Image (spheres, grey):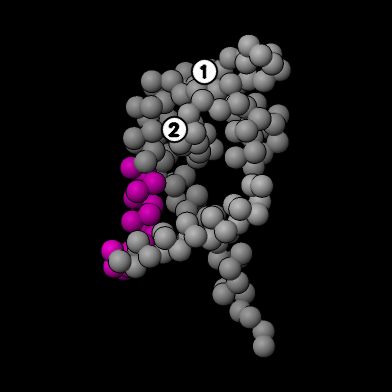
Amino acid sequence: MKTQFEERFGFLISDVGRLTGKRFDDLAKSSLDLTRAQCRVLAYLAHYGDVNQARLAVLLEVAPISAGRLLDRMEEGGWIERWSNPEDRRERQVRMTAKAERALGKARKVGDEVAAEGLSGFSDEEAKQLIALLQRVRGNLSRIVDR
């Protein structure tokens, strides 16, 4: 029995992520002075607090040099601050600025709008169930990948 491409778990997860990201970009152009990648940095910093630059690169799934360039632009724009770890000067720590904290609310609103569009036609219960199921999938994979 051949499984349909559209029914493949990995494809669906990846494609929903692609479409969500594209829609976020489209909506963000009119209301944010940040790219999707920059919003992701701020979301991770809001969630984890101050993080070292290497950890951000891992979370963003980009090479450390790419993360460094992204953070250079964000620092120039006043979105983040970086400093060297006093115990290991090679390690750069990153934190959000007050400007970024204010912008994060707008980014969340864009994300909420994308979520509402994606979940259009779902009952509240269905939406909650989908989120809970995705959290379980993330937990299952996180236990394997993040060991």
Specify whether residue 122 is painted magenta.
yes
Where disc 2 sits, the SS reads helix
Above or below for 136 versus 56 = below
Report the residue at 42% width, 39% height from top. 29
Residue at the far top: name it: 86
Report the residue at 58% width, 21% height from top. 93
Report the residue at 65% width, 54% height from top. 144
Residue at the far left: name it: 124
Crowding around mark 1 (Cα neighbors within 10 Å: few <14, some 14 to 19, many 20+) is: some
Q: Which residue is mark 1?
A: 81
Residue 14 horizontal side relative to residue 89, left or right? left
User: Mark 2 and mark 1: span between their CA atoms?
Assistant: 14 Å
Relative to the observer, which residue lies in front, 121 or 145? 145
* Amino acid bearing label 2: Ala
Q: Is residue 100 visible?
A: yes
Residue 14, x across and y down, in percent? 58, 59
Mark whose residue sits in front, 2 or 1: 2
Residue 46, x across and y down, in percent? 44, 33
* Amino acid bearing label 1: Glu
Residue 117 horizontal side relative to residue 36, left or right? left
Residue 44, x across and y down, in percent? 50, 36
The label on residue 46 is 2
Q: How many marks?
A: 2
Residue 87 lies in quadrant: top right
Label the magenta part by its dominant secondary structure: helix
Specify whether residue 145 is painted magenta.
no
Residue 63, x across and y down, in percent? 70, 36
- Name which of mark 2 and mark 1 comes first in the sequence: 2
Relative to the observer, which residue lies in front, 73 or 51? 51
First to last magenta residue range:
109-124
